[in-house]
């Protein structure tokens, strides 16, 4: 190799090294195991969109789904995926968190029944049982508002904690309805087990609409430039997913083992219309309305200032 070629190779190697060193490393903890709800994050990683923005994003799955926001608040993780209802509660309880991105811009939760049953409207739930994954709190407050919208109250039903066995509890008729089943997952899960479900959507039954999945950072140390780069990558990823859903699915399922399932493929199609096309954007009034709902339900005692947790 000539001296010139050696010099060029050395320069190229040095530039590559500098480029790698220049990348900002960000640890992002998901709310749950990887699934289609995380489409924008996975596609941004798979297509090198984070890298194009000078970011090295390390996506992590939590051992305990309740911990990601707490780890961000403690400075142990840079960003975390969480839910708007949980974010407002965490901020109201004093955690230094701020929303920096939206991944899923509509509610996913539903109140679900079997289509061939005797429940055709929420009013038909009188005297019936509703299974939930989590007792009390936001779940019962949401169910309460949905029932009130049809002239009932929580005292007219039995709310039963069935853990995470939502679909199977409904399919086996251990309960008459379930709350907490995602419209893009549980409906398909029921169908795969040979049952057809009917969903009542929370935002159509008196509950203020909200963003299902958001990304949060520590409000005391959030980096404006870093967040802008992160959101640009998410926006480009979402753009690609919407324009090329089949190709994006191929990229998604190749991210890691066990993603290529029939349930994920069905959920993928239903999730596309829920993705936030502008991840950086938010509606402060929407957040305020949901916070007021939480306060009226007694979930939080004091309304947090939206300026304190919307970045």
Image: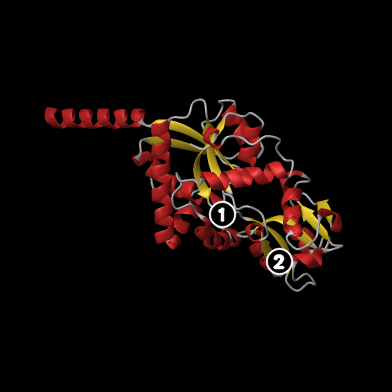
Q: Quadrant of residue 91?
A: top right
Q: Is residue 202 visible?
A: yes
Q: Which mark is residue 106?
A: 1
Q: Find disc 2 in the rendering and name its residue.
A: 193
Q: Is residue 35 left or right of residue 198?
A: left
Circle 2 or circle 1, nearest the eye: 1
- The residue lying at 70 percent from left, 37 percent from top is 300
Residue 119 percent location from the top left of the image: 78, 69
Q: Is residue 25 left or right of residue 169?
A: left
Q: Is residue 242 left or right of residue 118?
A: left
- The residue lying at 48 percent from left, 52 percent from top is 276
Q: Is residue 269 left or right of residue 298?
A: left
Element carrying mark 2: loop
Q: Quadrant of the N terminus?
A: top left
- The residue lying at 68 percent from left, 43 percent from top is 294
Residue 256 percent location from the top left of the image: 52, 48
Q: Are marks 2 and 1 in contact (CB under 8 Å)?
A: no
Residue at mark 2 to residue at mark 1: CA–CA distance = 26 Å
Q: Nearer the viewer, residue 294 or 24?
A: 294
Q: Quadrant of residue 288?
A: top right
- In the picture shown, does residue 140 fall above or below 267? above
């Amino acid at each position: 190799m000539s001296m010139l070629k050696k010099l060029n190779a050395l320069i190229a190697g040095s530039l590559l090294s500098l480029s790698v060193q220049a990348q900002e490393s960000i640890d992002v903890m998901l709310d749950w195991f990887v699934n289609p709800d995380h489409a924008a994050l996975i596609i941004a990683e798979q297509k090198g969109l984070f890298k194009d923005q000078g970011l090295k994003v390390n996506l992590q799955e939590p051992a305990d789904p309740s911990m990601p926001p707490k780890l961000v608040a403690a400075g142990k993780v840079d960003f975390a995926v969480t839910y708007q209802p949980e974010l407002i509660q965490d901020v109201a309880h004093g955690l230094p968190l701020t929303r920096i991105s939206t991944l899923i811009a509509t509610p996913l939760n539903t109140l679900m029944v079997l289509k061939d049953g005797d429940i055709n409207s929420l009013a038909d739930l009188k005297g019936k049982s509703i299974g939930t994954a989590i007792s009390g709190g936001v779940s019962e407050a949401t169910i309460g508002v949905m029932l009130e919208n049809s002239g009932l109250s929580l005292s007219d039903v039995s709310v039963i904690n069935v853990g995470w066995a939502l679909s199977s509890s409904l399919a086996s008729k251990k309960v008459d309805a379930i709350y907490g089943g995602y419209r893009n997952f549980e409906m398909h899960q029921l169908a795969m087990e040979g049952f057809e479900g009917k969903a009542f959507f929370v935002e159509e039954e008196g509950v203020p609409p909200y963003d299902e999945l958001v990304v949060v950072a520590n409000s005391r140390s959030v980096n404006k430039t870093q967040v802008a780069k992160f959101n640009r990558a998410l926006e480009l990823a979402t753009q690609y997913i919407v324009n090329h859903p089949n190709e994006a699915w191929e990229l998604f399922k190749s991210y890691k083992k066990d993603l290529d399932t029939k349930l994920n493929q069905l959920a993928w199609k239903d999730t596309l219309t829920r993705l936030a096309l502008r991840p950086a954007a938010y509606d402060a009034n929407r957040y305020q309305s949901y916070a007021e709902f939480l306060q009226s339900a007694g979930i939080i005692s004091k309304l947090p200032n939206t300026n304190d947790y919307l970045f």
